[in-house]
């Protein structure tokens, strides 16, 4: 009627084996989940790093282009100003020389007319 000692041992071993199998399955599932989470984290970190590097590279290229454009514009403006100043100086010198020549000619003509008359 009552279970014998060997039946009790078998039942205990079976229950222990079932518990161990369940624990192993749970541990394997947890390990798989942890592994997939860590892979996902690595992928996200890599994507974020790549995006940051690309954005920084684009910003650096844009800054360099803007600086180059500003330098070119400044150089062009300076060259234009220098050319304008040179042209103005040349025109002023030519006008002054012409005025001096005209004055000298007029004075000479007046002197000649006075002396002759």
Image (cartoon, rainbow, N blue to C red):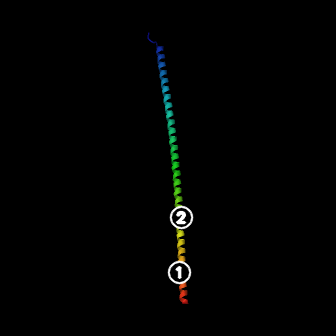
The residue at 55%/84% (across/down) is 109
Q: Residue 55 in the image: x percent, y percent?
A: 51, 47
Please name the residue that numbered disc 1 is placed on: 103
For mark 2, does the 10 Å Cα neighbourhood hold few (<14), some (14 to 19), or many (20 or more) residues?
Answer: few
Q: Is residue 13 above or below residue 42?
A: above
For mark 1, does the 10 Å Cα neighbourhood hold few (<14), some (14 to 19), or many (20 or more) residues?
Answer: few
Of residues 83 and 48, the one drawn nearer to the viewer in this rendering: 83
Location of residue 116 (image quadrant)? bottom right
Taking the view exactly as shown, the residue that stands out farthest to the front is 117
Q: How far apart are marks 2 and 1 (CA)?
A: 34 Å
Instruction: Report the quarter where the C terminus lies.
Output: bottom right
The residue at 53%/51% (across/down) is 61
Of residues 108 and 45, the one drawn nearer to the viewer in this rendering: 108
Of residues 54 and 23, the one drawn nearer to the viewer in this rendering: 54
Helix, strand or loop at disc 1?
A: helix
Q: Which mark identifies residue 80?
A: 2
Q: Is residue 113 above or below residue 32?
A: below
């Amino acid at each position: 009627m009552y279970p014998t000692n060997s039946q009790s041992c078998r039942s205990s071993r079976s229950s222990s084996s079932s518990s161990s199998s369940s624990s192993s399955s749970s541990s394997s599932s947890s390990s798989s989940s942890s592994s997939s989470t860590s892979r996902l984290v690595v992928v996200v970190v890599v994507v974020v790093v790549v995006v940051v590097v690309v954005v920084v590279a684009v910003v650096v290229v844009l800054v360099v282009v803007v600086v180059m454009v500003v330098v070119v514009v400044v150089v062009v403006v300076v060259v234009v100003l220098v050319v304008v100043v040179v042209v103005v100086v040349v025109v002023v010198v030519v006008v002054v020389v012409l005025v001096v020549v005209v004055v000298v000619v007029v004075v000479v003509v007046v002197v000649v007319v006075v002396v002759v008359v």
